[in-house]
Image (cartoon, rainbow, N blue to C red):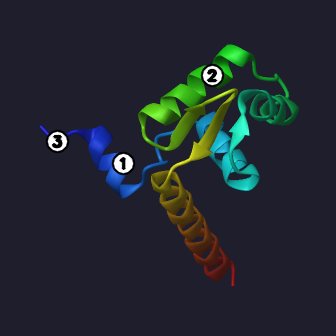
Amino acid sequence: MPNSHAESDTAHPLADLSATHRDLLWLLSQTGPSELSPLRQALADYYTDGIDRTHCCDTLEALRERDLIAKQTHDTTTYRLTESARRALSARQAWQAGNRSTTEREDE
């Protein structure tokens, strides 16, 4: 039986992620390497219900397990996008742009 998780990783690696997962990836793509506190604060500012530290840590860990972010610990812990994440975000943006242009053509 095929591994659906592996298939989704190769076809559309971000398709089965939650909005919080994708938002964290987007934040890291915009800010570059970052520590937990500013990432959590940006999410808390965006989500009306806020986001607690544990949820943010769990989300970052899930992204790390999928090889979408790397965790670096020296004096402080920082998170950064992996090359896999950059490719996945680029593919998602292309997919979104394609869907927008398809919708625009249908509206004409």
- Give percent across and percent down for residue 92: 54, 60
Q: Are marks 1 and 3 in contact (CB under 8 Å)?
A: no
Other residues around mark 2 within 10 Å, as few (<14) / some (14–19) / many (≥20): few
Look at 46% across and 41% down and name the residue there. 16
Q: Is residue 86 left or right of residue 1?
A: right
Q: How many marks?
A: 3
Residue at the spot of label 1: 9
In the image, residue 103 sits, relative to residue 87, either above or below, namely below
Furthest residue in direction front, as rendered: 75
- Give percent across and percent down for residue 19: 63, 39
In the image, residue 9 sits, relative to residue 91, either above or below, namely above
In which quarter of the view is residue 25 placed?
A: top right
Mark-to-mark CA distance, 2 and 3: 30 Å
Q: Are marks 2 and 3 in contact (CB under 8 Å)?
A: no
Furthest residue in direction left, as rendered: 1
Closer to us: mark 2 or mark 3?
A: 2
In which quarter of the view is residue 3 placed?
A: top left
Residue at the spot of label 3: 2
SS category of the residue bearing label 1: helix
Look at 64% across and 71% down and name the residue there. 100
Residue at the spot of label 2: 57
Of the 4 image quadrants, the one containing the C terminus is bottom right
Other residues around mark 3 within 10 Å, as few (<14) / some (14–19) / many (≥20): few
Mark-to-mark CA distance, 1 and 3: 13 Å
Look at 81% across and 33% down and name the residue there. 38
Q: Amino acid at mark 2?
A: Cys
- Nearer the N terminus, badge 2 or badge 3? 3
- Give percent across and percent down for residue 104: 67, 77
Other residues around mark 1 within 10 Å, as few (<14) / some (14–19) / many (≥20): some
